[in-house]
Amino acid sequence: MNKTKSIVVAGLVAGLGLTACNSGSIRRNPGKTYAPDMVYSRAYDAYTANPNFADSQTSRPPVAGTIAMGHELPDHLVEGDTNAYKTYTTSLRFTDAQLDEGKRLFNIYCGICHGTNLDGQGPLYASGKFAAMPANFKDGKYLHMPVGQMYAAVKYGKNMMGSYASQLDTKQRWMVIAYIKKVQSANGGDAFAFGAAATDSAKVVAMATEPKADTKAEGKK
């Protein structure tokens, strides 16, 4: 009898021990790590000193000659160089969807002053809080304004208008300008030149829908 009790007790103890060892997916004891300084790298805050670099700075500048994915080439404009403004342009061309995005951005950042109709009758001016009327993009003074001048105004600001360089990246600035030029072209301005060519769009669609050849099958032939 005593032997049977001992077996039962031993089984219960072993079962409890195994149950205690099973913590599900949570491992509370990480065990031992060889060379932990190689496994867990030391973290440095962005603006703290860092002995690993010659300048002791943790934050690193972009690698020279590189551009972040999704960003455009730098414009190299210098604030105040009005001659450069007049000749500056872009090779970017925009689809209807991108022009709609340009309109959306215009209404967010520009419409408050210039008006959603681009007529200079935005809510701020219409409220009587500003004595000077914002630019009316449908007026003859602005219908033929070079796109580079518009770009510089967005980037650096002009007169009472502040800079929007922090709100709009390079491509977004051109989207807004393309939208303005699209509206101007329908109101006596220059012919619109920022639209994506229909033939190019057709080529993109054709390439996307064209069935790919089975190279393995061809090889067997």
Image (cartoon, rainbow, N blue to C red):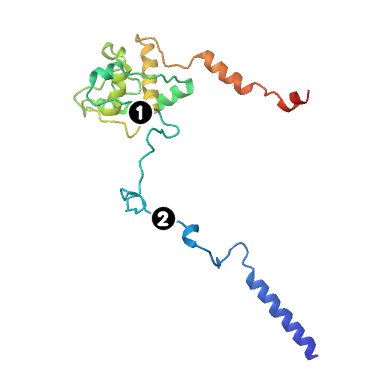
Q: Image quarter for residue 194?
A: top left
Name the side, left or right, on which 126 lies relative to 220: left
Q: Compared to 4, does 24 lie above or below?
A: above
Q: Amino acid at mark 2?
A: Ala
User: Which amino acid does the dot numbered 1 rest on?
Assistant: Pro
Counting from the top left corner in percent of width and height, residue 48 is at: 32, 53
Look at the picture and state if 1 lies above or below 22: below
Label 2's element? loop
**Disc 1 from disc 2: Cα separation:** 32 Å
Give the position of the C terminus as an image quadrant.
top right
**Quarter of the image containing the N terminus?**
bottom right
Tell me, yes or no, whether the two marked residues, 1 and 2, touch with CB atoms within 8 Å: no
Q: Residue at x 74, y 79 (%)?
A: 11
Q: Which mark is residue 9?
A: none
- Residue sitting at the far left: 131
Q: Which quadrant of the view contains residue 85? A: top left
Q: Which mark is residue 74?
A: 1
Q: What number is the disc on residue 43?
A: 2
**Earlier residue among tags 1 and 2:** 2
- Residue 144 can be seen in this image: yes
**Residue 171, x across and y down, in percent:** 40, 27
- Decide if residue 114 is in sight here: no
